[in-house]
Amino acid sequence: MSVVRPARCLLTRRLVTASQPAAPRCSAPFHSSSPLAKRRPRFKNIRAVEMGLISPEKVEEFSKENFPAYNPEEMEILRHTFTPEQMAALEAGEAAVDLKDITLQGRIRRDPYQLNHLDDFSNIHPIVDKRPREIEQPLHPESKFMNETEHVEHLENYLQSMIPRDVNFDNMTAQEAEQILNTRIDFNMKSAEYFEEASTLLGHPSVKSNAMAPALGKKIEGIAGMYKPPIDPADEGLDDEGIYQNLKKKTGLTVRQILDVRSKILVTRLVHNQTRLGKVRSVWIQAIAGNGDGRLGVGEAKSTEAQVAVLKAKLLAIQNLQPVRRYEERTIYGTVEAKVGATIVKIESRPPGFGLRASHRLFEIFRAAGIHDIAAKMPRGRNPMNSVKACVEALRNQKDPNEIAIGRGRKLVDLRNVYYGGNVM
Amino acid sequence: MGGVKNFVNLCSHIQNASKARLGLTSIAHSKHRLAVLLAMQRAGLISFVTRGGSTPPDPAKLATYEPPPLTTANIAKQRLWFGLKYVNDAPVIGSITNITTSKKIWTANLKQLEKLTRGFDCNYQKGLDLGECLFVFTSRGTLESREAIEKKVGGMLLCRVSP
């Protein structure tokens, strides 16, 4: 078989296709449904030309408004700053650039290397931009280190400059003069300034012996006045660090009231999270809070920092303050039992003067809640965390006598109250 | 005491029905059960109790409902229908514990019953707590402990009902 034939075939086909208009690759429909009509926009677009936005007059107007020429006063300022040669170059540059080009061609950058913010670099923004480097003056060729007499003279001038001009030291005793000087001048600062800052070169006073960068001032340009510390005058200066502000919003308590709530840490546990990088040690804190008058809250928090965990737990406890039902504002209603895990806490009401007979954690809970007569038992487990949880649950589980009376449709009478004619408190 | 076993069944049935939040339930008829249920109704623990057949009485016509006459022919199929009460989505009867069982009969005389009702432990029994009821089988019928004290009788301790 000849090799020429397929080549000729290919060539002919190529020539044929080249001479004919290109047919669609495949005219057969791929699916039976009729093709959709060509989508049209819902609203007619209006071209900028039709709105008259890019007419020559508009372009000129925009250029004049946004890129005005220097006025004589500005030119005067520039002339003051630049040399005549620089001014000539500047004017030539101004004349060379067509304003129309700037208007039509200048646009906001959309390239991948654009800045994250819009900027024409006319101002230095202290947060975004680097601090401009101070222009170092070259050393004067004739400057030299001071000799002894020059040092003394320099020190004398420095001391002279410290003397306040508005005070008349004539007819003043040495003591009085010293008193005034001590009040007016901070000698420690001044001496530090002399040794750290003052130049040791003659004829070049701008050179300082201190290599440290100047510290940030209190009023930083661009930031000053923008951020106000969240100090509420209603807090009476009790919360300058803003620790209680969130809690204040959530609870509606004032900072004074928040500080008056008694909180106490009942359980501390050191817990570890084993990761592939080692153990991450944290502190888990369970705290209670109570106003000593029928309100009780529990907060639990964990953090790698003990102080953070303590603060979080205490704030949560205050946030969770809820009323606890109390009989005669001294004990509970009847006998209640609650179980968390293996720990059962059983609390029983007791007569006045009985006191708090409970384990130390439960004692703290009752004291915070404002309960004065109670007996508590933990017949089974005494896990610290679960005992606190179970005790609080028991206090919340108390039956409401009113609800019992309503449910049974019978009148329930507090016999003690009736017997003593209401004088039970 | 054939009635004790029946009665223990009643206790567990009421507690189960309460936990299942049933509004109306029934148990096979017996005179002891009827007596206890009537005492519970007097104490306000159940809303009503009536004898009936295998279908419950119409709750809308309970006030005028007449149970069928008791005959030897139908007595085996008679049931006690009673309504359970709830308040704030919690049952009025939280738990029932029977004290007397067929294995051991517990009794309390008037003095002991008075002590128990005032809330003091007595005769190996815990004193009554807030909202609790004690039902006693006495010579004057089945009564709540406070009724029994009023009538100055003691008797067999049947069950303790807690809210």
Image: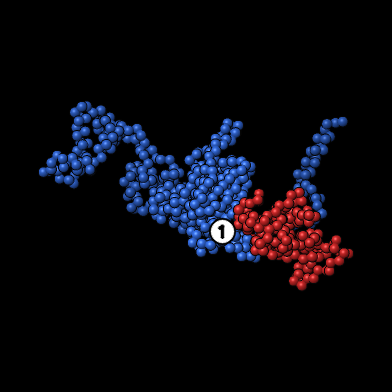
The residue at 58%/31% (across/down) is A278
The residue at 55%/48% (across/down) is A375
A182 on left or right of B156: left
Quarter occupied by residue A169: top left
B154 on left or right of A383: right
Quarter occupied by residue A130: top left
Q: Quadrant of the N terminus of chain A?
A: top right
Reading the image, the residue beneath label 1 is A48
Q: Nearer the viewer, residue A260 or A139?
A: A260
Residue A86: percent from left, percent from top: 36, 42
The residue at 64%/55% (across/down) is B112
Amino acid at dot 1: Ala
Residue A191: percent from left, percent from top: 26, 35
A200 on left or right of B159: left
Q: Which residue is at the far top?
A: A147
The residue at 32%/50% (across/down) is A76
Q: The chain shown in red is which? A: B
Q: Is residue A106 visible?
A: no
Give the colour chain A carries in the figure: blue
Residue A220: percent from left, percent from top: 38, 46
